[in-house]
Each structure stands twice: as structure tokens, then as C-alpha cells.
Image: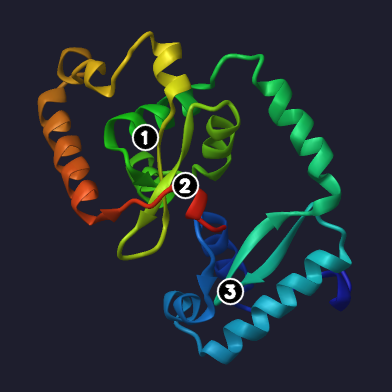
Amino acid sequence: MTATDEAGSPISGAVEALLLMATEPVPATELAEAVDAPVAEVEACLAELAGFYDRTGRGFELRRVGNGWRYYTRDEHADVIGRWLLEGQRGTLSQAALETLAVVAYLQPISRGRVSAVRGVNVDGVMRTLATRDLIEEVGRDGETGARLFGTTSHFLERMGMTSLDQLPPLAPHLPDASALEAELASLAESGLRDAAPVPTAEVAE
């Protein structure tokens, strides 16, 4: 590759890895702390990465949003992504989607970051698929972090044949050592309810 075809900063790989795992825009100061580099060096790296993606015609771009940075798909691919998501509604949910939906159902209201922490993987794509299928929706903002909170929809209850979340089955009968897991999930849910400050969905801005 030529110098114009690659991002040459020594910290670019680490910065990319952190941004790929991010569920919200990440400030340069946080990235600098994570990679143990000066903020100015990280800001230069971010600008270099953004230019690199533009020059090489990647399907995604790196944008500065407010005080942070995050990856987004490019606008010119919106039609392809839309068709793919809509066509996916005719199929069954993947194992990853089912596991993510279960986490949201039992721990709601919950942020994408907490769902990722519970599952141990990035769940951005799966969460978008669940939202597109009207199984989950935004229900508010976290009072401390401002992160968007998600919960299940009335359509979810309809598909599950339930009228209330109280009808969700207990976890213990279905999982090995699930009594401890159920207690841990209940504790997390109570913590989430204490910390969350839901607001009407119409007032939630991107």
C-alpha cells in the first residue's frame, strides 16, 4: 500500500478496536486514556482514519458526533441496508438475536452497553434488527450516562402470547445453576430501575 492508502498511526488499530465496540460516540479524551496516548495524538489519528475511509471508499465512515466519535454506514448504502433488514423480517431470529432479546426482556429498561456487557459481544446490529422487527424500542435515557434505554414492545408480548411482562417465565427451571443467575439478573434489573430516568420516547433525540 502507498502512504495515501493506509492509516499509519501506531495507535490506529487500538483506536479502531475501541470504536468498533462502542455503543455511543466516544470522546477523544476517553480514547486517549484507553490507549495511553496524548489527546492531540488521538485526535490526529481519528482525523487520519476518517480520511483513510473516505479515500478508500469503505462502506462505513467515522464521524464526529457532538463530543465523540463513532462508526456509521454511508448514506449511499441506506437502500441496500433497508432492504436487507426488511427481508430479514421474514426469517426466524438468529440465536444471537434470541439471546439479546431475552436480556432486554428480563433486564429492561437497559442500555445497549449493558446488553453488550451481559452477552460479552457488540450487539448494535442485533439491537437494530430487533427494533426493525418491532420487538424492542427506546423507552428513555439513563439518568447518569444519557445512554438510550430499551425495552420490549406490545408486539413482543403479542408474539409471545402474553398480556404482561409479569407472565415471563422464571429462569431457574430452564438453566443449569439458574437460581444464582436469576438472582443476579434480578439484582441488575433493580439497579437499572434505580439508575434509569425514563422519558417519553418522543423526547429522545439521537
Residue highlighted by disc 3: 66
Residue that appears at 51% across and 49% down: 202
Looking at marks 3 and 1 on the same chain, the residue that comes earlier in the sequence is marked by 3
The disc label shown at residue 104, or none = 1
Three-letter amino acid code at the position of disc 1: Val
The quarter of the image holding the C terminus is: bottom right
Residue that appears at 56% across and 62% down: 19
Residue that appears at 20% across and 36% down: 185
Tag 3, which secondary structure? loop
Q: Residue 6, percent across and down?
A: 80, 70
Tag 2, which secondary structure? helix
Nearer to us of marks 3 and 2 is 2
Residue highlighted by disc 2: 201
Q: Is residue 176 left or right of residue 205?
A: left
Q: Is residue 129 above or below residue 33?
A: above
Tag 1, which secondary structure? helix
Residue that appears at 24% across and 15% down: 167
